[in-house]
Image (cartoon, rainbow, N blue to C red):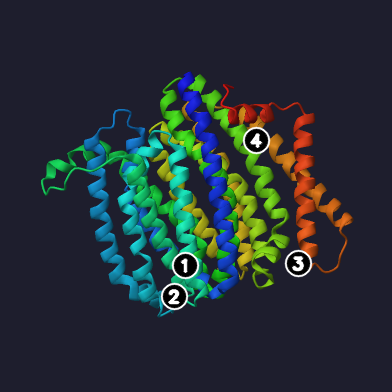
Amino acid sequence: MSDTLKDKAAKGLVWGAVNNGATQVLNAIFGIVLARLLSPDDYGLIAMLLVFSTVATALQDSGFVIALTNKRDATHDDYNAVFWFNIMVSIIAYVILFSVSPWIAAFYNEPILTSLSRYFFIGFFIASFSIVPRAILFRRLQQRELALMALSSLLISGAVGITLAANGFAFWGIATQTLVFNFCITIFSWYFSKWRPKPFTFHISQFTPLKPLLGFSCKMLFTYIFNNINNNIFSLLLGRLYNKTEAGVYSQAQKWNVMGSNTITGMVHGVAQPTFVQVGDDKERLCRAFSKMLRFTCFISFPAMLGLALIAREFIIITVTEKWLPSATLMQLLCIAGAFLPLATLYYDMIISRGKSAIYMWNVIIQGCVIMGSLLTVHYLGGSIRDMVIAYVIIVISWTFVWHFFVNREIGFSWYQALKDILPFFFIAAFTMVVTHHLSLFILHSSHFTFYTSLCLMLVRIFLAAIIYLGIIYLSGAKIIRQSWEYIRHKQV
């Protein structure tokens, strides 16, 4: 990488960390307040709609944004064609979803979903206006601007959501929060990107730039659809196979897991793919860049997510009260899978940057089919929600090795190097959490945990885990702490 690219990547990591860290903190604050005001049933209703909304979002993107990111000579005409195509697809998708809303309500046997879904789905249509401006900011590695607009939008929408929930609007408050967030993101993305589309014309030539991107984008489209189904499969199945309360309990557990893993994933993803694209075809340099990012991801992801699993019970009691305590066990299991999701993201960022959209597509589709089949099998064998989550965790962890197989084939990143980068951090983090668990219970032995004893236990566990983990890393002579500090200081590594 050139010095300029290294500097951009370093600044991108820093601002990516600020963006995702601050975003998840604000999400956590707003989530805590809303969870105290609302019931599992309220969250369950919104969770039932997420899979439909995210599939519609995938359709409006249509894979063209990633195709443009990979195209090194993208022009204004390219972006203009994608912009108007996104708007057209969004209108069609919303009309379809508006029409089938009664069927969605009938599927879940929840009549209120007819009106709620028609209102909630407006959000993805609003978001279609921000896709191209955000893609431009992403391509330019303008993580600072992305951070500012995400945090501002979250503050405004969070305040609206809490105000409505406190005044008895229940799940309508959550839906409105999403709409306001998408509206703010759209306004800020246009402001920061300075990009403006050409006027729409009905001439087919306006969409001619899409033709070279079509093959890649179609594969990405199918991939996005399956990926979103994978991410929301529990919400879809639980709402149908169980009830809205259990769907709400799961959604609370998954929310905190997603906040944790997305903080890390977003920080890395915002830099990884543009960096890999700009490195080019030098496989030796790609391996070095990938190895460095993999170590950094493992160094952060394993202790953060396994640590979140460690304090899940106390965290739930302190933040959203004991009415959500059934979420704690599911949250612990999901956090184990969440520790590996940032690694998987890094792997498929490399695959996408190499233009191998077909590999990415089939991998995600097959993984989704395996997850769906496994969950249905567990259910019809009489398994509980917990058993379904365990099956999901096993598949997610196992699929990391599938992703590695293809990265190894593309750039020659060996199995030995991958295990050397991953396993030390995993075993140190796992050992840290086991030791911390027993030491903390010895220090604060109690048969019943109140709010205050739970708070003390959580703080003790966080402190002990941080000391033990960083102490072992330092004593082992690993360079990752120094490298991370140099990244923060914008030095070359």
Q: Earlier in the sequence, mark 2 or mark 3?
A: 2
Percent of width and height locating residue 427: 73, 40
Q: Is residue 248 left or right of residue 64?
A: right
* Residue corresponding to mark 1: 174
Amino acid at pointer 4: Ile
Q: Earlier in the sequence, mark 1 or mark 4?
A: 1
Q: Are marks 2 and 4 in contact (CB under 8 Å)?
A: no
Amino acid at pointer 1: Ile
Q: Secondary structure at mark 3?
A: helix
* Residue corresponding to mark 4: 422
Q: Residues within 10 Å of mark 3 (few under 14, many from 20)?
A: some
Amino acid at pointer 3: Phe
Q: Are marks 1 and 3 in contact (CB under 8 Å)?
A: no
Q: Is residue 359 above or below residue 242?
A: above
Q: Are marks 4 and 3 in contact (CB under 8 Å)?
A: no
Between residues 467 and 216, which one lies in front from this camera angle? 467
Residue at point 65% right, 49% down? 305
Percent of width and height locating residue 133: 33, 43
* Residue corresponding to mark 2: 108
